[in-house]
Image (spheres, coloured by chain):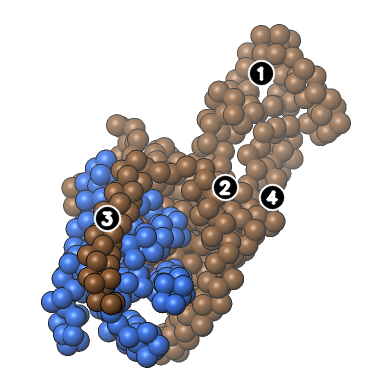
Amino acid sequence: MREPTNRVKLPFRVSSHRLSLVLTLTLASVLLVGRAESYLVDRTRQVMTDLSAPLLEAASRPVAAARNFIASTDEYAYVFEENARLRAENEALREWREQALALRRRVSRFEALLDVSVDPEIQYATGRIIGDSGGPFVHAFIVNVPQSNGVEAGQAVVDDEGLIGRVVSTGATASRVLLLTDLNSRVPVRIEPGGYRAIAVGDNSRFPKIEFLAPEAHLSPGDEVVTSGHGGLMPPDLPVGMIVMASDGRPRLQTNSEFDRTSSVRVLQYQFPTRVIADSDEESAAEEINEKDKLTAPQLPNSEPAANDLIVERAGEPGAAAGTDAALASETESAGD
Amino acid sequence: MRDVSQVFWIAIPVSLSLVFILLGLVPVGVGTGGTIAPIFTLTVVYFFAVHRPEFFPPWAVFFVGIVQDVMSGGPMGLFTVVLLAGYGLTHAQRLFLIGRGFSTMWMGFAVVCGLAAAISWFGASVHYGFVVNPLPLLMQAGITALVYPPCSFILTRVNRRMTALVPAA
């Protein structure tokens, strides 16, 4: 009795299996080609990251412990050489410290003379890397720093060597960090000592490209790369890496940080200085800002602020991306007129 | 009775895949630039497509692929296409692979990994609109092929438990 039923059922099962495979494959292809990257996908991604964060944290602890153990074993083997190297470095650093202290005193005197307001101190949140995307097309970390610690999308993330990337999404238990090497990473940088501005563009290789460089820029291998602060998301002058020349003669960025060795990171809660007021009397400055807020741009009264009454353009307004220095310079020029 | 418990049995490979997805996200710190982790889920898909396709239907593979796409942060649909294509190829060769020794199974898996890399390269190139570098994909395919033995060890034990309860079709 059962045999005929099975004979009918089996071909049906096979064909339904094939049909199901074709349908799901088609749907997946549509998702891929149609670039289904919506707000919903981003939110789902963050929710799932938050849900998996405790598990990832638990799983990453023994791995981190093993890595630390291996690293410490390595260090133990070279402890004498390392000791001698550190002594020499310490001596050199002591000299640098004296110079730095002297310079700081000097800068403080100048700041006092010019009555300059400095940027507020950058707050930060420290976290551990608990997840690594590990894909050939995505270079991202999951760090156990939640939104409640003041973390927001766009904030710069550094390790003890320098910039590693920026926060792309944040949730209740963890945040995702896009690395400098990722295909979607674009970071405005400045190349020293020439001061050339460029964009470090990730291309999934180990060495991000340096693009939008001025034609007259002359770069040499070893030139230092720091953040320019343009765009207002990242603080300026964060160390990023140095210039290396690719085999095609084009400059590339070698990051200071070795991402596969990084275990702890800091998220810098940098606030773009929307107002930098060089006025010792804060109350009168605040009143003045309120007054100016009420006025529209064409109605600004004889917009010639006093030299010690500098107002930097607001973030989001045209020219805000030019950064604090440029704004200060233009304001000073207009004041000088 | 068997139909009623079907969902329970499907949950086994799906759960294993989810655990493997998390395993792939654990930062081990080995790689070049960004680390490259193996596609652990491909081992589950391959194994079940050969031994127990009835407990790992295409829609379950689709679900696993979507979860992996979401968790990895990569292009949506890429892992799903890769896993489904690997599943389709393996299922088509099921009669050849079933009952073969470990080395044949491993070689079969290596072929599937190669196919996965090729599909991944093509899919990513279409998605991004330019030809992506195939080297990281080849590296990932190689690493994935290398992790098959330990994964197969776990999966074989799971399959034995399942066979004791529900004989293979």
Which of the marked residues, 3 or 1, is nearer the chain's N terminus?
3
**Residue for point 26% across, 50% down:** B123
Name above or below for residue B92 compared with residue A33.
Answer: below
From the top left corner, tell me how far across and down residue B141 is, in percent: 24, 68
Is A91 on the left or on the right of B118, as rendered?
right
At horizontal 36% and vertical 73% (from top left) the residue drawn is B55
Chain identifier, colour blue: B
Q: Which residue in the protein does label 2 denote?
A: A153
Q: Are marks 3 and 1 in contact (CB under 8 Å)?
A: no
The dot on residue A19 is 3
Q: CA distance from mark 4 to mark 1?
A: 28 Å
Disc 3 residue type? Answer: Leu
Which mark, residue A335?
A: 1
* Same chain? Circles 2 and 1: yes
Question: CA separation, marks 2 and 3?
Answer: 42 Å
Describe the element under mark 3 as helix, strand or loop. helix
Which label number is shown at residue B39? none
Closer to the camera, B92 or B112? B92
